[in-house]
Image (tube, rainbow, N blue to C red):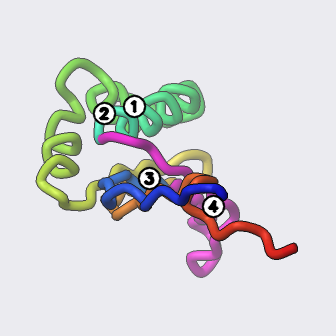
Amino acid sequence: MRQSRQPGPPLTAFWCERVVYETLGADSRTHTSRCSRPNPGEAIRAIRVDVRAIKDTLAPAERERALRWTGPGGSVGAVAALYRGEPCGFSLSSEGRWIEWTVRPYLAFDVSDLSLLPRAS
């Protein structure tokens, strides 16, 4: 007989979203991407990588703001907010679009295959 293992305690994980809006329309959402990261550092790193990937398409003022935020110490406040259990975000305007990144803590539960019910025969 297979022995069931109890699911582990809930763990805090971090839900990341990037939403792109057309600024010329009435806030029409054009693209949404989502992922989960295991800790605040990884969540903010995902945003920083994304922002750096588009920096060359930004107007000079937005590029400067993006480089400050992705540079050394620029996103420390965002990481600190996540460690306190608070959501955080960053947004930019790029080529007629508004791009918004948000991260929110959530409870993730361990649901391994050992904790599932056995198959009925």
Q: Disc 1 to disc 3, how far (Cα)?
A: 12 Å
Question: Which is closer to the viewer, label 2 or label 4?
Answer: 2
Task: Specify few, some or many for label 1: CA neighbours under 10 Å numbering under 14, 14-19, or 20 or more.
Answer: some
Q: Residue at x 43, y 60 (%)?
A: 7
Q: Is residue 66 above or below residue 27?
A: above
| Closer to us: 31 or 64 | 31
Quadrant location of the C terminus in the rendered image: bottom right
Q: Is residue 103 left or right of residue 59?
A: left
Extreme residue toward the right, this view: 121
**Label whose residue precedes the other's in the sequence (4 or 3):** 4
Find the distance from the CA under tag 2 to the CA under tag 3: 15 Å
**Residue name at image x 58 percent, y 53 percent:** 114
- Report the disc number at residue 32: 4
Q: Is residue 17 left or right of residue 74?
A: right
| Residue 95 percent location from the top left of the image | 61, 47
| Three-letter amino acid code at the position of disc 2 | Gly
Principal secondary structure, stretch drawn in magenta: strand
Residue 3's spot in the image, x, y percent?
56, 56
Magenta range is 17-39
> As shown in the figure, which amino acid type bears the numbered disc 4?
Thr
Helix, strand or loop status at disc 4? strand
Residue furthest top in the image: 72
Residue denoted by label 1: 45
Q: Which residue is mark 2?
A: 41
Q: Nearer the viewer, mark 1 or mark 3?
A: 1
- Specify few, some or many for label 4: CA neighbours under 10 Å numbering under 14, 14-19, or 20 or more: few
Question: Mark 4 near mark 3, Cβ–Cβ under 8 Å?
Answer: no
